[in-house]
Image (cartoon, rainbow, N blue to C red):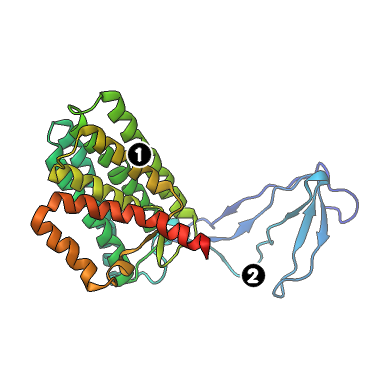
């Protein structure tokens, strides 16, 4: 290959392989490297960590970084198995078992959500709502276990988000739809439930890409919204169907709102007398107390938002 002049129309074939007869395994050692290279000039760059590099310039495309040649002085190239990235850190037997246990909880939540859909389709929405409550329990358990056992990972976060969409973004509105089928117009129930599913998807996607706040949620979390919907069906609120439908719509919009809602860690620090009020209320009328507690929580978001705006 010439050193001077344009290198246009010149090409090299690139291949990476192993010597014949070498054993295969989790890592492969490259013994041969060639680069497909066309229509560029090589410009030397400043050495990086003692190794010379070159930059390819190609017309209007601008500078393009070139891979460093694989020579004996650089040592063998190791290609890691992609599956190793699922569990960051050391791969001890204890961590593997812990990782599997955490993801089993996530799959259990997903399985309970699917079961809730099947039960709702067969005309048993109250039992389906009970399975949704189980989904909420497993959803909280997998996160707590991941932090406790030190096996939190990007894979686990994505898997949890997908399971939440199935259990809380799909199963919850299906259960609500089955419970309202005979009380409100079918079209109205369908629109309200589609609204829940759409807002849940937006809420989960926004959570995945937004910075986390240790004190407040931005909008009502999908887990809490699903818990409210499940308990609404399970306890059978003595409210007109249209009122329940309106509450479902409000809850859906609350998920995608930017109002700050306190996390559980802050709620448990509330004064004791505030906890005594709902406890006493449950002894008098559990259903009414549930409605008042949910309404107070939903109303707390706009109140804190207005308070922050005034400051």
Relative vertical location of residue 213 with respect to residue 127 in this rendering, above or below: below
Q: Label 1 belongs to which residue?
A: 197
Q: Residue at x 69, y 51 (%)?
A: 35
Residue 309 x %, y %: 52, 60
Q: Nearer the viewer, residue 27 or 155?
A: 155
Relative vertical location of residue 49 with respect to residue 281 in this rendering, above or below: below
Alpha-carbon neighbours of circle 2 within 10 Å: few (<14), some, or many (≥20)?
Answer: few
Q: Residue at x 62, y 57 (%)?
A: 32
User: From where the camera sits, is residue 155 visible?
Assistant: no
Residue 279 x %, y %: 14, 63
Residue 216 x %, y %: 40, 63
Left of 90 or right of it: where is 96? left
Would you identify the image quadrant in which residue 301 lies? bottom left
Q: Label 2 belongs to which residue?
A: 74
Q: Nearer the viewer, mark 2 or mark 1?
A: 1
Q: Nearer the viewer, residue 86 or 202?
A: 202
Left of 63 or right of it: where is 246? left
In the rendered structure, which disc, 2 or 1, sits on the residue that comes first in sequence? 2
User: From where the camera sits, is residue 216 visible?
Assistant: yes
Q: Residue at x 12, y 35 (%)?
A: 124
Residue 287 x %, y %: 15, 49
At mark 1, the secondary structure is helix
Q: Nearer the viewer, residue 94 or 29?
A: 94
Left of 30 or right of it: where is 80? left
């Amino acid at each position: 290959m010439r050193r001077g002049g344009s290198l246009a129309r010149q090409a090299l074939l690139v291949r990476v392989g192993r010597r014949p007869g070498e054993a295969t395994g989790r890592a492969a050692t490259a013994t041969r490297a060639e680069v497909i290279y066309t229509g560029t000039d090589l410009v030397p760059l400043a050495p990086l960590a003692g190794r010379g590099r070159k930059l390819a310039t190609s017309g209007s495309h601008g500078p393009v970084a070139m891979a460093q040649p694989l020579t004996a002085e650089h040592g063998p190239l190791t290609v890691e198995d992609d599956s190793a990235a699922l569990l960051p850190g050391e791969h001890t037997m204890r961590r593997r078992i812990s990782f599997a246990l955490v993801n089993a909880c996530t799959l259990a939540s997903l399985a309970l959500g699917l079961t809730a859909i099947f039960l709702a389709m067969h005309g048993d929405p109250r039992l389906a709502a009970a399975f949704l409550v189980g989904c909420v329990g497993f959803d909280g358990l997998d996160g707590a276990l991941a932090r406790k056992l030190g096996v939190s990972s990007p894979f686990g976060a994505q898997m949890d988000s997908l399971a939440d969409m199935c259990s809380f973004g799909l199963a919850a509105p299906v259960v609500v739809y089955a419970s309202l089928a005979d009380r409100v117009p079918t079209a109205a129930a369908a629109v309200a439930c589609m609204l829940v599913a759409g807002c849940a998807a937006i809420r989960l996607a926004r959570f995945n890409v937004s910075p986390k706040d240790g004190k407040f949620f931005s909008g009502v979390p999908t887990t809490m919204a699903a818990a409210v919907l499940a308990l609404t069906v399970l306890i059978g609120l003595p409210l007109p169907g249209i009122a329940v439908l309106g509450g479902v719509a409000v809850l859906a919009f609350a998920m995608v709102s930017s109002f700050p809602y306190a996390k559980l860690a802050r709620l448990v620090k509330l004064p004791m007398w505030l906890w005594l009020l709902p406890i006493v209320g449950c002894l008098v009328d559990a259903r009414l107390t549930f409605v008042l507690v949910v309404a107070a929580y939903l109303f707390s978001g706009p109140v804190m938002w207005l308070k922050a705006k005034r400051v």
